[in-house]
């Protein structure tokens, strides 16, 4: 498979192993590069800037021809580490940055100074045109089949709308669990795809076996939207615990979110509480199972090495 993304990143297959909070790590991305695709890690997966710096150095040492690596930055005010993370990434270097949940202007300006490409998450044409005007190198089109924070439009509608209106590559995010899915996205006009949920059940993922097995045991019909993690609708597996706590924000959060002065702080608090709950569920034995995933886990039938998952996607 060749598409614009292979040329853009110098990779063999037009696939980005999507950045996943708590899941993505150096081992996964190293195997992704060996498999001829790009790998990406959320900068927030590292508690300190020195840990982030160490990870970049290790990935640079592990780099192989036909693979590339990058980092995901949350660029809004909820991420108080953003500026430090951007500085470290630009100092150490990587192939690309994916921005999420905010304006990418500063990231684009700083990254381009050191030759790092910037791809921006968007869910509609309005923001796609904005990031294109700011100088983004490509657009990550987050559709309604994505895991985690997702968009409202179908893959076909979103890809066709953006590719016909924008002059930079469109990378489709969401709804890909097999080669058939990739071929369909490329057929709609995508330059490549971003694939996340199928890699949760990888041997290299640093999450509990229970989380991985859930991606095997549950399917597309078991994915629901919740407002209880970050304040922004997010997809999770509909475990008994999720059913118990519900998927809507509390009445108090609803009231406070209507107050312009308090809204930002309420969202930051919800983000902190939700991320902590997600971390505990992913890394500890706990009944509070809030497992983030997308409907593409439908294709996950067993826990496999990253290389085997890539083979399934490209063959």
Image (cartoon, grey):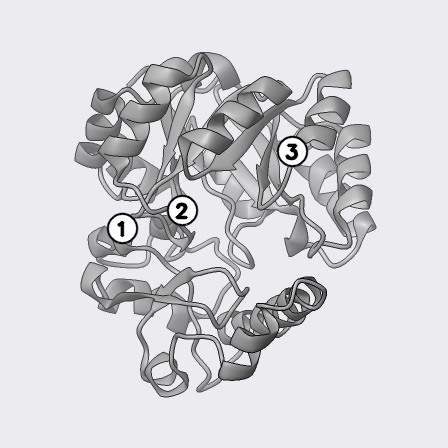
Q: Give the quadrant of residue 315.
A: top left
Position of 148 with respect to 100 (left or right) is left
Q: Name the residue carrying label 3.
A: 104
Q: How far apart are marks 3 and 2 (CA)?
A: 22 Å
Q: Give the quadrant of residue 69.
A: top right
First along the sequence among labels 2 and 1 = 2
Q: Determine contact: label 2, label 1, CB under 8 Å.
A: yes
Residue at screen point 48% across, 56% down: 205
Q: Distance between the residues labelled 2 and 1?
A: 9 Å
Residue at screen point 33% across, 55% down: 294
Please state the horizontal and vertical placement of residue 266, each as a whole percent of the image: 65, 70
Q: Which mark is residue 296?
A: 1
Q: Give the quadrant of residue 132.
A: top right
How many neighbours does mark 1 have within 10 angstroms: few (below 14), some (14-19), or many (20 or more)? Answer: many
Please state the horizontal and vertical placement of residue 144, each as a whole percent of the image: 31, 47
How many marks the image carries: the answer is 3
Q: Which mark is residue 196?
A: 2
């Amino acid at each position: 498979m060749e598409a614009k993304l292979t040329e853009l990143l110098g990779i063999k297959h037009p696939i980005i192993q999507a950045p996943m909070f708590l899941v993505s790590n150096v081992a996964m991305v190293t195997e992704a590069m060996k498999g001829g695709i790009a790998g990406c890690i959320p900068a927030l997966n590292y508690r300190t800037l020195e840990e982030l710096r160490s990870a970049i150095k290790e990935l640079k040492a592990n780099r192989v021809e036909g693979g590339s690596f990058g980092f995901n930055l949350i660029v809004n005010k909820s991420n108080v580490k953003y500026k430090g993370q951007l500085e470290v990434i630009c100092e150490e270097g990587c192939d690309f940055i994916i921005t999420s949940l905010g304006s990418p202007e500063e990231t684009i300006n700083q990254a381009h100074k050191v030759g790092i490409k910037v791809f921006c998450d968007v869910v509609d044409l309005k923001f796609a045109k904005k990031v294109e005007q700011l100088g983004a190198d490509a657009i990550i089109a987050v559709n309604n089949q994505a895991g985690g924070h997702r968009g409202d439009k179908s893959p076909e509608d979103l890809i066709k709308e953006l590719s016909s209106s924008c002059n930079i590559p469109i990378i489709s995010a969401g709804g890909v669990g097999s080669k058939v899915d990739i071929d369909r996205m490329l057929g709609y006009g995508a330059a490549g795809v971003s694939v996340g949920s199928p890699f949760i059940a990888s041997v290299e993922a640093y999450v509990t076996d229970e989380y991985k097995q859930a991606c095997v045991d549950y399917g597309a019909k078991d994915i629901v939207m919740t407002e209880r993690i970050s304040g922004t609708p997010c997809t999770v597996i509909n475990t008994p615990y999720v059913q118990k706590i519900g998927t809507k924000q509390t009445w108090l959060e609803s009231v406070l979110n209507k107050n312009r002065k308090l809204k930002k702080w309420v969202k930051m608090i919800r983000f902190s509480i939700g991320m902590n709950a997600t971390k505990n569920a992913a890394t500890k034995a706990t009944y509070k199972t809030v497992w983030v995933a997308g409907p593409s886990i439908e294709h996950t039938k067993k826990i496999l090495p990253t290389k085997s998952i890539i083979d399934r996607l490209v063959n």
